[in-house]
Image (cartoon, rainbow, N blue to C red):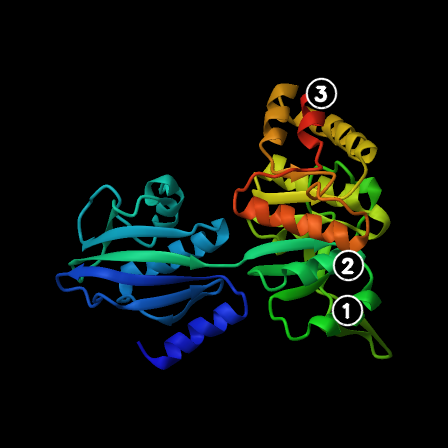
Amino acid sequence: MSGDFFNSFNELLGKYSPCVLVTVVESSGSTPAKPGFKMIVNENGRLDGSVGGGASETFAVDYSLSMIKKNEKYAYFSLILENNNNNAKVNSKDEKDLLSRIDSSSKKDLTSKNNLSLDSTCGGSLTLFFELFANIQLNIFGAGNIGLNLVNLVKDLGYSICIFDKDENKIKDISQLYSSYSNIGFYGISNISHDNILKSDTSYIKAFKWLEEPVKFDISEDKTENKRNQIDLKNFLKPASFVVIVTHGHQDDNVILNYILNLYLKHDFQFSYIGMIGSKSKVKSVLENLFKGFKPLFKDTSSLKEKLESLPFYSPIGLDIGGTSAAEIAISIAAQIQATRYNKDQNNLSIVQEIIKNLN
């Protein structure tokens, strides 16, 4: 491969941008793809390289995009390139349907290939190995003392960090401290209202990049307004991400938690970790109220409880290591995040599971 290819790859990794490296590991027949051919696919599609073009490359790009969306770590496919009606024949019409039907569990064993037949005139076969390169997204809601102490602890540990806050002046000040870190982004959140709690959709919280200039447009000849590109918060969140809720004065913790639970319970949006700061009495009250609001969505309370019990939700947040200062609390949160990331036993402060068992 050329130096430009690896430069593109290293640049993506340096920016903490998710991408899939697709490699041809076997080929036979008249396919132009040869072992060692590589292609990089990022969130916008093919970025560099090639795995032979045609139907196989179209499939490889589409499957790579689905891996980025689902946070799927790797896949292994053997593609048969021919013109007949085999069981998994793919053409432009039903390619998307094939992607939705592929069982991800069958790709975890790399000793077995997934055989697919593609509608292609070139003939031959090739085997592709897909590998996702993506840092874990850590979403911190609240740029206060705890949130910033947490950033300082984990900024070099392979996380793509998104800091959300309502205070633009605060964001402008602290962003200068992290200007050299390409893995830290600052985002505004708006339309947060306690009236929206338990709302049936997930469009009531908007998010936008704080440090981007607002879009200017003319309303009239003598008036210009600035508008930020605000979109639904869920579009900023990646599957399997980590969430820490520590808003200023805990003012909006309940609203953010409800939004996250909405995504999980109603839209099956998966999270690897959710932590919310708060006293035991606050946690109990919040969970009881949210439980009542979500009950109508389920046939019985047991199914709702089972769903909540399977969620990696911790509150009070952090490990029981002692200390009450913002810096000490941040250390306990960072330790809990790392323990969750590496599936280690934890001495949690959380009482969530205990409360859920007693909900009715």
Q: Is residue 149 left or right of residue 129?
A: right
- Residue located beneath label 1 in the image: 174
- Residue located beneath label 2 in the image: 143
Q: Please say whether residue 85 is visible from this viewpoint.
A: yes
Three-letter amino acid code of the residue under disc 1: Ile
**Percent x, y of residue 13:** 49, 68
Taking the view exactly as shown, the residue that stands out farthest to the left is 29
Question: Alpha-carbon distance for marks 2 and 3?
Answer: 34 Å
**Percent x, y of residue 238:** 57, 52
Q: Quadrant of residue 216?
A: bottom right
Q: Residues within 10 Å of mark 1 (few under 14, many from 20)?
A: few
Q: Residue at x 60, y 35 (%)?
A: 311
Q: Residue at x 77, y 56 (%)?
A: 327
Question: Alpha-carbon distance for marks 3 and 1?
Answer: 42 Å
Residue contact at pointers 3 and 1, CB within 8 angstroms: no
Q: Is residue 95 left or right of residue 359?
A: left
